[in-house]
Image (spheres, grey):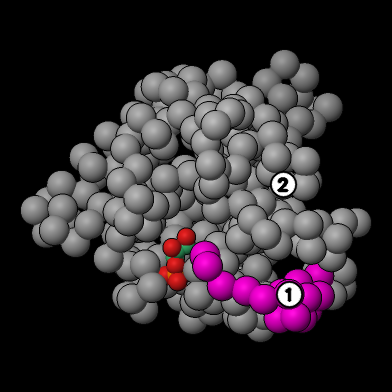
Amino acid sequence: MIEVLKMRRKLVLGNWKMHGAIGTNAQLLQAIRQHLTTSSLPVDVGVCVPAPYLSQTRDLLTGSDMKWGAQDVSAHAKGAFTGEISAAMLAEFGSQYVIVGHSERRAYHGETADAVGAKARQAIVAGLVPVVCVGETLHERDAGMAEQVVRNQLSDVLAFVGSENPAQIVIAYEPVWAIGTGRSASAADAQAIHAALRACLSEHGEAMNQTRILYGGSIKPNNAHELLTCADIDGALIGGASLVASDFISIIDSASRAASASTVSDEVFDAGVKP
Ligand code: 13P
């Protein structure tokens, strides 16, 4: 009997941010969906859209291999919180993922570590997978604090969500200075931080080795392969390039090639019953 360890399946996730319109959404999603039907995917693919488009996204993607989700969620389950959207509401629209603690929300909306943790917990309670963003500013990197900053951000959120089920959460390393700047982290620098995050996860139990860690920050078709073949980079969280069908598809294809190349080495024999 051969057991294939539940290896970390690569995940390619688009973050549309505050972009989109009913007409262009349909063109974009239909083009990606069409591409994905031509081959069986060795990777997971999803898009995190502005909340008003969840219904449209669900209608366009139901029955496809693509998943969808949102970019933020309330830290509360329900109540008098005008303007907030609960995790249960996102789940009602078929969402699978929700981005939590994106640096734009931490910076522009003052989201604290406690708020990020509470949001991640609400997501899990509603059956969603929170994609928790961590990342250092340029100032922090220049001061040699990058690793410590992201380890602290990760530990803060794990204190809220626990570590019983590693598949319940996805981590996204997004260096703030690389977001929307066209200046991606080098593969070596990204891998170094991912390895540090992996080590931090492992300190919370061996099972957490199965938690996926995505890289985000100026991922484009021309740097996706290099980043996605790094040992501890389990996928991509993509902003600008997720709005261009051909770019997003190209990055999905890079992830698929990287996943196919690593499949054989990730297979292990069940220690108890060797063939
Ligand atoms: P860009 O890919 O546009 O740099 O954005 C990255 C990001 O913030 C994804 O969440």
Residue 179: x and y in percent read: 37, 67
Q: Residue at x 61, y 81 (%)?
A: 244
Front tag of 2 and 1: 1
**Which amino acid, mark 2?**
Ser
**First reached walking from the N terminus: tag 2 or tag 1:** 1
Q: Tell me the distance, in whole angstroms, between the alpha carbons under discs 2 and 1.
A: 18 Å
Q: Is residue 232 visible in the rendered structure shown here?
A: no
Extreme right residue here?
63
Q: Is residue 69 magenta?
A: no
Front-most of residues 48 and 34: 48
Quadrant holding ligand 1? bottom left
Residue 25: x and y in percent read: 71, 74
Please say if the residues under marks 2 and 1 sit with CB atoms less than 8 Å apart: no
Q: Is residue 22 magenta?
A: yes
Q: Is residue 132 visible in the rendered structure shown here?
A: yes
- Mark 2 lies on residue: 95
Front-most of residues 15 and 218: 15
What is the magenta range?
17-33
Left or right of 213 on screen, residue 268: right
